[in-house]
Amino acid sequence: MHLIGADNIQTKLTDWLAARRAPKNSGDKAKEFHKMNLTRSEFRQVFESAGFFIESIEPVENMPILYKFAFFRAPSHKQFDENKARAEGYRLSWFGQKCQHFLMSGFPDQFCNIYVLIAHKTK
């Protein structure tokens, strides 16, 4: 099993929000973070070209994009607390849950955080 970041709307929105909140230090290359995000087809291609048989690739959300906005969070999570969110799960309000369900059921490849790939090496 391997986890990888998804190259999609959610990731682009998350990166944009993080950039907006980051302090503006011009020329500070030491704080740059490099990561790799792949589309589902790119992810499949990497593993198949390495000689793996892909059993499945599933889009998964570990933190809903709507949790980034206090409006969509459960009442007990209105004030963002990373430790609480990780311990209790990223809880959304009733409305937030409905909206997130719509996004994930209608557009899973665009609103997942990661892909989970199950594969085995071909002989």
Image (spheres, grey):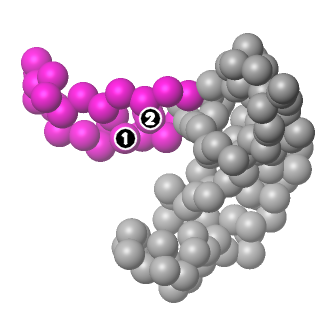
Residue 79 higher or lower than 65, as above or below: below
Residue extending farthest to the bottom is 76
Q: Are marks 1 and 2 in contact (CB under 8 Å)?
A: yes
Q: Position of residue 14 (x, y in %)?
A: 49, 40
The single residue placed furthest to the top in the displayed view is 49
- Identified at 74% across, 67% down, the residue is 97
Whole-percent x and y of residue 83?
A: 38, 75
Q: Quadrant of residue 114?
A: top right
Q: Residue at x 30, y 32 (%)?
A: 33
- Left or right? Give the position of 84 relative to 72: left
Q: Judge whether residue 25 is colored magenta.
A: yes
Please name the residue that numbered disc 1 is placed on. Answer: 18
Residues at marks 1 and 2, CA–CA distance in whole angstroms: 5 Å
Residue 73 in sight here? no
Amino acid found under the numbered disc labelled 2: Asp
Asked whether 74 or 35 is in front, the reply is: 35
Counting from the top left corner in percent of width and height, residue 112 is at: 69, 45
Rate crowding at label 1 as few (under 14), some (14 to 19) or many (20 or more) other CA atoms within 10 Å.
few
